[in-house]
Image (spheres, rainbow, N blue to C red):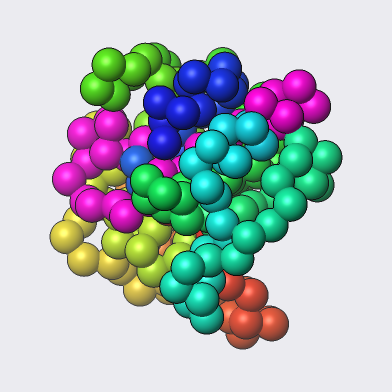
Amino acid sequence: MLAVLERHDVEFVVVGGYAARLHGAARPTSDVDVTPRTTRDNLDRLASALRELGARIRSVANPDGFRFDVSGESLAGVRMLNLQTDHGDLDLAIRPAAFENGYDDLIDRSTMHTVGRLQVRIAALDDVIKSKETAARLKDLQALPELYRLAGNPAPGSFPAPAQKAAATPKSKPTAAERIAAARAQVQRRQDIDGEPGVEHD
């Protein structure tokens, strides 16, 4: 999938669980998440790559996925698109959690990484962590301790109760445990208010 994107000159940053893997995380992921640049020319190139990949909208209701009209214009207003392709699952995280400007917010801190014979841009580890803290789904919370360790901020082996956050000194930098607790509290508040799920990307 990445090779096809590269061949079509699509500008993108790898994010989510696959970016975490490239940073050294052991936690498996079943798809690749990318944040494309949202200029019209780039979205047109992305649409061309998706057509070559046979991209369909992923749905539990239809194992074969749903065909859709792929064009730069149709992609312009999309925030998140979960796709399946002839080569695996591909998620377009055009505006990942915590990064409303998407590609423009991520590109300066991204780094080049070798994937097979390709050189691709991956989001900075701190940005991967920030996005997972903001999305705060269960799988994000479960991934955070390992990511904190990779970033040099060891986290405990178990999640603390959200109430422990109050013990932090107001002006002190939050610990990994406190950051996990805050993310858990955030998702609980969303569920209490309207059951809003986390942003759908790994």
Could you tell me which quadrant the N terminus lies in? top left
User: Picture coordinates of residue 39 (x, y %)?
Assistant: 77, 25
Which of the 4 image quarters holds residue 161? bottom left
Q: Measured along the vertical axis of the image, is residue 172 above or below residue 83?
A: above
Q: Measured along the vertical axis of the image, is residue 147 above or below residue 84?
A: above
Residue at 58% of width from left, 72% of height from top? 197
User: Picture coordinates of residue 110 (x, y %)?
Assistant: 47, 20
Left or right of residue 137: residue 9: right
Q: How many marks overall?
A: 0
Residue at 37% of width from left, 15% of height from top? 119
Viewer-proximal residue among 105 and 28? 28
Viewer-proximal residue among 104 and 179? 104
Q: Is residue 37 shown to the viewer in this render?
A: no
Q: Is residue 64 shown to the viewer in this render?
A: yes
Is 31 in the magenta? yes
- Span shown in magenta: 19-45
Viewer-proximal residue among 73 and 201? 73
Is 63 in the magenta? no
Q: Measured along the vertical axis of the image, is residue 187 above or below residue 52?
A: below
Viewer-proximal residue among 183 and 140? 140
Left or right of residue 85: residue 142: left
User: Picture coordinates of residue 21 (x, y %)?
Assistant: 27, 39
Residue at 53% of width from left, 71% of height from top? 59
Residue at 66% of width from left, 36% of height from top? 47
Left or right of residue 115: residue 133: right
User: Picture coordinates of residue 111 (x, y %)?
Assistant: 41, 17
Q: Measured along the vertical axis of the image, is residue 60 above or below residue 71?
A: below
